[in-house]
Structures are given as structure tokens and as C-alpha cells.
Amino acid sequence: MSDIEDVIILVPQWFCDRIIGPLMATDLFVQYSEKLKTQTIYTFEDIKEVLVKAADMGMLIPLLGHFEIIVLLDAKDYGGGHRGKFIIPNLLSLYMPEDQWRKEVRICLYFGRRFLCKAAADIFSPNFFPQLQARLHDLYTKVNRAPSGIWKNGIKVSDIVEALVFLSDNQRDVNVAVRCEQRKKLEECYSLMEKMTVTLRQVLHATSPGADVEFHVLSAYSLRHHHDLNKVGSYSIEKVLQAEKMKTTLYDENIGIEEEVTDLLIPGFDLTVLKEYGIKSDVKWMTHKTRQEVVILLEKEREDLKDHRLLSRYMGISRAEHEAIAERASTADLYVTDLLFDKWSENWVTTVRRDGASAKPIVGEVHHESSIENLLEINKKYLENDSVTCAIEDMLKYPDGKPEQAAVEYEEEDE
């Protein structure tokens, strides 16, 4: 620890029995004469009174914070006035405050992930979720985004958009949900969900290294309609990928509703499909950065027509459809090429759902299947835009973004 001297606990039983014991004890533990009262926030004196003379409090408090057993509060946390006070995640109220995740008409976009124990023998360590709460609280307090709420099995944070991390009642699955008002905030939604997931995996590995977990995608419908958080539906990632491959919807048999894959994953930011299917992926799963780069490259109309006009012809989009799309783009201040990609994807999904396995991806020179592979083929054969080819091939090679060293080497090659 950087702020205090090294500490070696020579008698672990003392630390567990004389320190952790009184801090966590309920009325069932009669061996402790002094126990903490049930409340949300504790003072230095509350803890000192329980521990009596068992330890040097000046050294013990930072140590407990380092072990993520207690959470030190700042002046602005939870309404303010709590500087120097503490939260002990294990002693929090069981129930989520009603104001933390209530339904808001203006908020309509929900996404989420679930990590659940794979077999009956797999369990989360008892300190897993309290430690996760302490870690998240510390991370977001340091960037002046202190959580707005924390309770026994959940914590809510905000970073432009809102995120909720909650543990199921049976303590066998932990969930991350994010929500926002507008599609222009999808990048923030995905970014926050990724940060939550990375932290969750780190704490899970440290506290429950033997636990084997499955990765599921939460039902956007369940989250949006605020079903009991313990009853929110989910789909295994294998089912989600299979549905995308077959261009089908996912069916939640408990609720009786169908959901699109694009309602569950965030196109342009979630790389799950792109990493699984690569060049065979639909163009809607291109990274947002690459798609915007390609759109801009093909948007400017050229004298030789090697732009979005020629592109639409080989996508199987008629001239009349192209003109209607161009008019819509002009009215809404959008890119024609961007709307063409959307239309191409929609047409292919419709074709596959109608014709099933007999759907024909290519008729002559027209590529009806809206795959990245076909986009590359059209570009190489007819548009001959080397910058488009480079952008797509870089994305396929480096879906997470080109490493700094690779980017430098690439620039040197260009020179």
C-alpha cells in the first residue's frame, strides 16, 4: 500500500475473529458483545466502539479499505456531508431504493449482460459482490462520478448514461444493465457496460477463481418493462450468434415475446458478431469508426459514378429506391451511403426469412447478401477505392483498434 507501511498479519485468526467478526456480526453471533447497528453509513467512532482496543484504528481503517471490506466516503457522496464516514457493503439494506431504477418514459434503450454459475458446483465467493461494489465505488468516486445508490445486492453508477449492477436473490448470477434516451448515446452505453464487465471479471477472478460462468445477453424487453430484476430474461451468447447467422429473432418463452439481435447487442460498438464471423458478418456489425470512414469515402459523387450510386446498383437496390433514400438523406441531413447500408441489411434479412436456406446471395453481378465480404468484392471489382479496402481490411485485422506500433509501421509503409 502506498499510503501506509507494509503490514504483515502474523495471526490471520485474530484478523478474522477480532476484526472482521464484530464488523460483520448479526444478532446470531452471541460471542460479540458489541455489534454494529443496522444502518447505511457508519462513522469512525461506530467502528472504533465495536472493535474496542483490538487494533490501531489509524492503521486498520486504510487496511480494511485496501481489502475492499469497507468503502470510505467523500464529502459529496450520497447527498453530501459524509466525509470520513464509511459504507460496509455486507451490512447494507437488502432492497433497492425505489428511486434508483424506476421506469422513465424518456428512457427507451436498454442493454445488458449476465454472468451466471454454469453448474451446481460453481458458486461465487461470499465476498465477491461486496468487493465488486467497493471496487466500483472507488473507481467512479475517483473520477467524480460517485454511485447514486448502493444496497445489499446492487449498485448504480452514471457516466453520461446509467448502469445498474445487481446480484440475483439466489446469488448465482450477476447482471450489468445500461440504459439511455437516444441512439446517439449508444457508444457511451457500450463503453460503460464494458467498464463494468472488465471490473466484474477482475474481481470474479480474484475472489472466485474456480467458478465457471456462462455469458448471457439480457432481454432488452424485460429490462425496458422493468420486470422483477430477478426475473429478467436472458439468452445465451451461442443462441444470439446462431440467430444472427440464421437471420431469425430470439424468442423468450417465459414472456412470450420475440426480439431482434440488434435490440440485444449494439451494432457498431459490440464486436461479438464481428469477432465470431469476421468477413462473413453483416455490414451492420462493422465498427462504427470504420463504417463512418467508408461512408464518407463513398459519399462524394464522382464523375465516373464510382461512389454510392454504383454501390447501390450492385447491392440490388433499384434506381427508384436509391432516389428515395437520397431524398430522405437530404431532408434528414444524413449520409446516403449510411442509409444504403441499412437498406441492404434489411433486404437481406427479409429475403432469408422468406426463403430460408434457399435464399440466393448472388444473382449475376448483384450481391444481395449484405456481408462485409460482398462489400469488399463490390469495392474491389467496381468502385476501385483503395482507401475503402484498407479501412475494411484494417478493421478485420484489428477489430479492437490498430495497436500503436502497428499504426506507426503502417504509416512508415505509406511513406
Image (cartoon, rainbow, N blue to C red):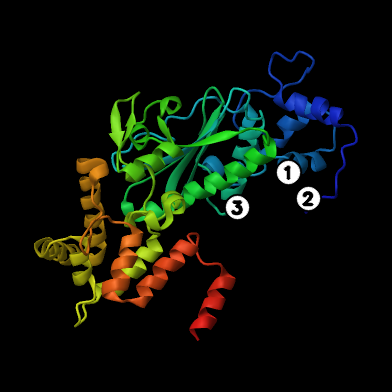
Instruction: Calculate the distance from the C-alpha at mark 2 to the C-alpha at mark 1.
Output: 8 Å
Q: CA distance from mark 3 to mark 1?
A: 15 Å
Q: Is residue 91 left or right of residue 270?
A: right
Q: Give the image location of residue 322, x and y in percent.
A: 14, 64
For residue 66, which numbered disc appears in the image? 1
- The answer to whether marks 2 and 1 mark residues whose Cβ atoms lie closer than 8 Å is yes
Q: Is residue 355 left or right of residue 142?
A: left
Residue drawn where x is 40% and y is 43% of the image = 241
Task: Give the residue type at disc 3.
Answer: Lys
Q: Are marks 3 and 1 in contact (CB under 8 Å)?
A: no
Answer with mark 3 or mark 2, whichever residue precedes in sequence.
Answer: 2
Observer-nearest residue: 373 or 60? 373
The image quadrant that residue 324 belongs to is: bottom left
Q: Where is mark 3, residue-wise?
A: 142
User: Is there a contact, CB below 8 Å, between mark 3 and mark 2?
Assistant: no
Left or right for 140, reference 297 = right
The amino acid beneath tag 1 is His
- From the top left corner, tell me how far across and down residue 338 is, in percent: 26, 63
Query: Residue at 50% of width from left, 59% of height from top?
Result: 400
Check disc 3 and report its element: helix, strand or loop: helix
Residue sitting at x 50%, y 86%:
415
Can residue 196 be seen by looking at this rendering?
Answer: yes
Q: Which residue is mark 2?
A: 1
The secondary element bearing badge 2 is classed as loop
